[in-house]
Image: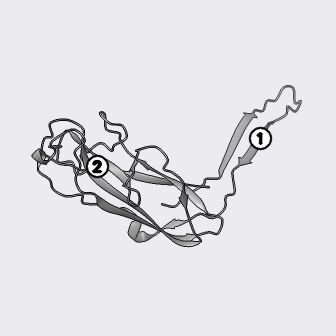
Amino acid sequence: MRVIHFITITTALLFISSAVVYATPVPLGYANFQASGTITPQTCDVTVASKNKTITIGDFAANSFTTVGSVTPAKDLVIDLENCAQTSTGSTITFSGTQDETDPALLKLSDTKGQGNMATGIAVEILDAVSGTPIKLNQPSAGISLVTGANTLKYQLRYKSTASTVTAGNATAIMYFDMNYQ
């Protein structure tokens, strides 16, 4: 995902009026224009292949989640970056989405296809693929070192039970990611 910085131009038209009183000119008013923004160094581009991914975690029987906290095997989520500038030496990544009510660190299932019949008692857990450490939803990750040019960020996704009873159904979700460069 490319980080886009906006330059805003704000315009305030404070007062404009005119009046004629006995042919005596009256000031027409004035306008105040202000521009503000930030110029930032070049960051990284997300490759076309890494944008808008669909990760299939798998199909699992509801009774395979035997206790709260049961997990499925994880599936890889790889994000490839290119054109990283020499000034882009580090970053954090934040995976965002709707938090599960039972465990806010997890991604809540959502009816992405409009089919209804949602599974219950499970959510999606995000992991750092290298360390296996869970990454909390909507919170910045630990710092990531970047090199000039191309970089590959490796994560994993898996289902995790949040209730003692899991019901079968649609188990889809939507997640986004944002990068903050250091």
Q: Quadrant of residue 63?
A: top left
According to the picture, the residue beneath numbered tag 2 turns out to be 173
Q: From the viewer's side, name the closer residue of 38 and 171.
A: 171
| Looking at the image, residue 122 lies above or below residue 81 | above
The amino acid sitting under disc 1 is: Asn
What's the residue at 44%, 53% (across, down)? 177
Question: Whole-Å distance between the Cαs marked 2 and 1?
Answer: 47 Å
What's the residue at 84%, 26% (across, down)? 21
| Residue 12 x/y as whole percent | 70, 39
Q: From the viewer's side, name the closer residue of 9 and 62.
A: 62
| Residue 147 x/y as whole percent | 57, 69
Crowding near the residue tagged with mark 2, few <14, some 14–19, many ≥20 C-alpha atoms within 10 Å: some
Point out which mark residue 94 bears: none
Extreme residue in the front direction:
131
According to the picture, the residue beneath numbered tag 1 turns out to be 32
| Looking at the image, residue 158 lies above or below residue 53 | above
In what quadrant of the picture does the C terminus appear? bottom right
Q: Is residue 92 left or right of residue 170?
A: right
What is the secondary structure assignment of the residue under circle 2?
Answer: loop
| Looking at the image, residue 1 lies above or below residue 103 | below
What's the residue at 38%, 65% (across, down)? 78
Q: Is residue 57 left or right of residue 91?
A: left
| Residue 94 x/y as whole percent | 47, 50
What is the secondary structure assignment of the residue under circle 1?
Answer: strand
Q: Nearer the viewer's eye, disc 2 or disc 1?
A: 2
What's the residue at 45%, 70% (across, down)? 47
Q: Earlier in the sequence, mark 2 or mark 1?
A: 1
